[in-house]
Amino acid sequence: MRTILSLNKCLAGIAVLLMLISCTTFKPGHKALLMDEAGDKDVSRLIEKAMELEAYAGTKEEVLGLIEAYRKVEKADPMNYFALWKIGNYHMLMGAAYAEKRKDKKYHYKMAVLYCEKAMCTNAAFQEATRNGDKVTEALDLLTVGEIDAMGYWYTARFYYFSEVLGGLGRLMNTRIVIHNNKMIERIDELDSTWAGGGNYFARGLYYIAIPERFGGSKERSANEFAAAINIGPEYLVNRWGRAKYLYQLIDDDEGFKADLEWVLSQDPHEGGNPYPWNVYFQEDTRKMLAEKYNP
């Protein structure tokens, strides 16, 4: 319940979205990271090694090693799209699963945003537009399905930053993060609404939970969005984990809560739609939720 209350507080400022000005800025990833030095040029072998690590990285140290493995790809090929969004994705996992202090979460989520932006800049038209001063969401129509993973994890990392790093006043002063995220979600819907096993539907499921009913919030709409995500990505652990964590706990649906979490635990973390390192996190968090509810 504490998690749900926290989530609700995170987006309580939605009502004043259009009246507030953002104070938090994310330094453009292409400017911060574009000029990294090249190293070993055997890119295909470096990617192969990183993917081998990804198949069993289930601890903090192993995820850090996985980030470093993809960083080696980046050093060899500074604009390697696959490596760049992977680095961003695993910085996000570090923030969500392993960072305990706010400053550490802040670091990892900002790095996730930076790397996802750099990955988007492998699109030459988008890179030129942002170099000329356009913000990410001002140039997003130039992005294609080829950059969709970077786009999706960009907005996801920013949501994590908004909810886990900013305090109450900070959220009120930075609600443009949510506005811009919604623009990116809309663009992904145009390109591939099934992205990441229903990732956009999952995000909207959280959104409809978090905002007050008078501003469009709806538990019923949230339930429909989660159901759509599960229909699109039935093998993705994240969908049932998230429905149990954010919706069923809120509405006190003990039967649904238990059924979803038991399903998550019954899955092979190597086979779920999400990568193994993320599945490890979902299953570990599931065990904690069950223990807190049934063995307090």
Image (tube, grey):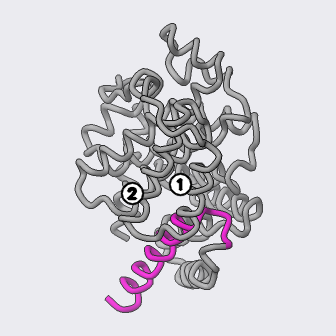
Disc 1 vs disc 2: which is toward the camera? 2
Q: Quadrant of the N terminus?
A: bottom left
Q: Secondary structure at mark 1?
A: helix
- For the residue pair 184 and 11, the one nearer the viewer reads as 184
Q: Main secondary structure of the magenta part?
A: helix
Residue 272 marker: none
Q: Is residue 204 left or right of residue 211?
A: right
Residue matched to label 2: 64
Towards the viewer: 184 or 36? 36
- What is the x, y in percent for residue 14? 43, 39
Q: Is residue 275 magenta?
A: yes
For marks 1 and 2 on the same chain, the one whose residue lies earlier in the sequence:
2
Comparing 7 with 95, the one in front is 95
Tell me if residue 31 is in the magenta stretch: no
Q: What's under tag 2, amino acid-wise?
A: Leu
Image position, residue 192 (x, y; %): 76, 41
Which element is circle 2 on? helix
Identity of the residue drawn at 46% across and 25% down: 34
Give the residues in magenta: 271-296
Q: Is residue 235 visible to the viewer in this orientation of the structure?
A: yes
Provide the residue designation for mark 1: 206
Amino acid type, residue under disc 1 in the picture: Leu
